[in-house]
Amino acid sequence: MPTKAFQDHYPDDSAHCYGCGYLNPHGHQLKSYWDGDETIAEYTPKSYHTAFPGYVYGGLIASLIDCHGTGSAAAAMARAQNRAIDSDPPLRFVTAALKVDYLRPTPLGPPLKLRGTIAEVKGRKVVVQITLSANDEVCAKGEVVAILVPDKMVQPDL
């Protein structure tokens, strides 16, 4: 796996996301990478990420799918534009829509593996289909519709 994740290329003024921002010490700090034409990430939930004893809280699952989706969108847009993910102007995305289907209870303990497929890159929009697995079983699947961040959202003095 490459040493730098998609999220590691975000500029400091937009790297505070609770799910994937490297400047948020309280967040998940999710890291996403290319694996051929798909994207991958791995996250091991903490003991307090529980719903029922032994199972992962559904909100965490949605958060991981969301942030893997926006990171994948940035990487996909960079590929589509044939440029580096850390080139200017920054490629930062926000979620326009998030759909999550919970297929089976997700066990707490094993690493969760996310795999994304880029379904569409069109204008300012990227659609990413994502599966979340534990112990090689798909536990949830989701779709993230991500939109390129408008310049007015970026506040350089954070």
Image (tube, rainbow, N blue to C red):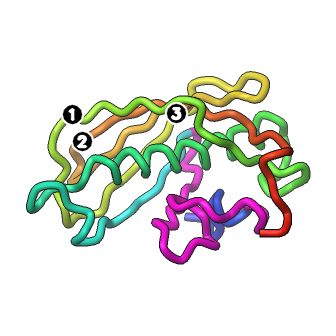
Q: Quadrant of residue 6?
A: bottom right
Query: In the rendered structure, are the residues bearing label 1 and label 2 in contact, judged by CB atoms less than 8 Å apart?
Result: yes
Query: Can you name the residue that lies furthest to the bottom here?
Result: 25
Which label was assigned to residue 103? 1
User: Residue under circle 3?
Assistant: 144
What type is the residue that disc 3 sits on?
Val
What type is the residue that disc 1 sits on?
Leu
Q: For the stretch drawn in magenta, what is the main secondary structure?
A: loop
Q: Which quadrant is the N terminus positioned in?
A: bottom right
Measured Cα–Cα span from mark 2 to mark 3: 17 Å
Measured Cα–Cα span from mark 3 to mark 1: 17 Å
Counting residues from the start of the chain, the first of labels 1 and 2 encountered is 1
Q: Is residue 106 left or right of residue 125?
A: left
Measured Cα–Cα span from mark 1 to mark 2: 5 Å
Q: Is residue 80 left or right of residue 143?
A: right
Q: Nearer the viewer, mark 2 or mark 3?
A: 3
- Please tell me whether residue 35 belongs to the stretch shown in magenta: yes
* Residue range of the region highlighted in magenta in the rendering: 10-37
Residue 22 higher or lower than 149, as above or below? below
Give the residue drawn at x 24%, y 53%.
57
Residue 122 rendering spot, x and y as whole percentages: 73, 22
Give the residue drawn at x 35%, y 53%.
60
